[in-house]
Amino acid sequence: TLGGTMVKISGSGFGNCSNIDVKFGDLMTCEVSECSNTELICNTERISKVHQLNNGGRHPVYGPGYVWSDIELEILPGDTVEWVWNLQVASKETGISVQQVESPANNEWDGKGFKSEKGPKGRLRQQFYSPGDYFYSSQPVFGKELFMKGKIQVVSDTEDSTSALSVMMEDIPAAQEVVADTGSVAYDGCALSPGSDCIADPVSSHAFLFTMAVCLTPSVSSVVISSGSSNASAMPISGFNGAGLIIEGSGFSDNSCQNVVSLGDNHHCVVTSSSTSQLTCTVDGAGETPMPSLKEQKIAVTVRNSGSALMAVSDPDTAKFYLVPKVTSTNVKNEEFNAAATTASPSTEGGVAPEKPS
């Protein structure tokens, strides 16, 4: 239901696909990754929505401008909430802000969630991936009593959705000649295990149909760091390059090459073992662009032939990895320090002995 499925589309007249747009109804786009005149391969991605909240609500005492337009908003995983506010006031002490709090009774920032600056005008955007309730409050708008509160409830899909394939070249839709599906997509030498038969294929004589099935969607329930952790960061999943992660959930493949664990946009956690309910992987922060230290890297799991996993973790911060820098060796060129290092006694266990007085 979240995308992440590779689709092969055969036909004719695709050209180089520079002006081709592939969708499945209003729910999924399909980003073209390979193309020829007769075949294209694309990756599905859910079309997320942006929900805008403003300070257009009416406070029973202070009037309009001091309550959010929707104080209990329900969204889907992957959607974005944008808060926009504008107060027509002259006082420098009066202003609105948005900050995540632990519960409806709290007004103080929880120290790790989203947070904005306070001001008479402002804007904050936040994307939500994990199901759950997210509470927020402002700092005091003025004085010490007026706080603008609300709740974002992220709920996962409970029903299947079926949409028709649409292939557009500019404004012209491609004609569809519906035939039985006889092929499959190759994944870099990974032989795919048979897919689940929890739902029947949709049938139509007019268009190719694609069903976003809840029973096929993998789910992550917990992420823990098993080795290479660091206490240098307050975030729960922080460690060195080569750290080990254990990911538990459901809907994974016991064929390791079918499970892909991404860290941010450019890096991976290489899967070393897998079952249908647990993955173990090793953080690989190398590559053409090394992973930046102490920067949030969103953890995402994709199961080839099933799609992107729902990150149903109890603490959304455990769905983020932070790389911590580590010194493994030094090369001291100063002669005096070199001499000191070579006179270290065995009791220092490789440390540097203090220099002898002259």
Image: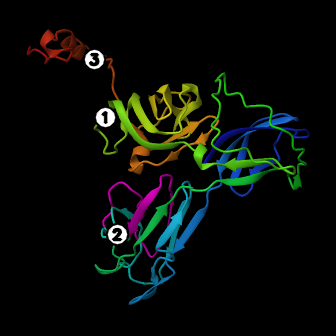
Q: Quadrant location of the C terminus?
A: top left
Q: Amino acid at mark 1?
A: Ser
- Between label 1 and label 3, give the one nearer the viewer: 1
Extent of the magenta region? 108-137
- Between label 2 and label 3, give the one nearer the viewer: 2
Q: Please give the name of the residue rendered at 63% of the width and 28% of the height, measured from the top-left corner.
A: 193
Q: Please give the name of the residue rendered at 43% of the width and 38% of the height, measured from the top-left corner.
A: 248
Q: Amino acid at mark 3?
A: Asn
Relative depth, front residue between 51 and 280: 280
Relative depth, front residue between 4 and 195: 195
Disc 2 target residue: 104
Decide whether residue 128 is among the magenta residues: yes
Location of residue 12 by image quarter: top right
Q: Which mark is residue 230?
A: 1
Crowd class of label 3 (few under 14; some 14 to 19; many from 20; radius 10 Å): few
From the viewer's perspective, is residue 234 above or below residue 135? above
Q: Secondary structure at mark 1?
A: loop
**Quick check: marks 1 and 2 in contact, CB under 8 Å?**
no
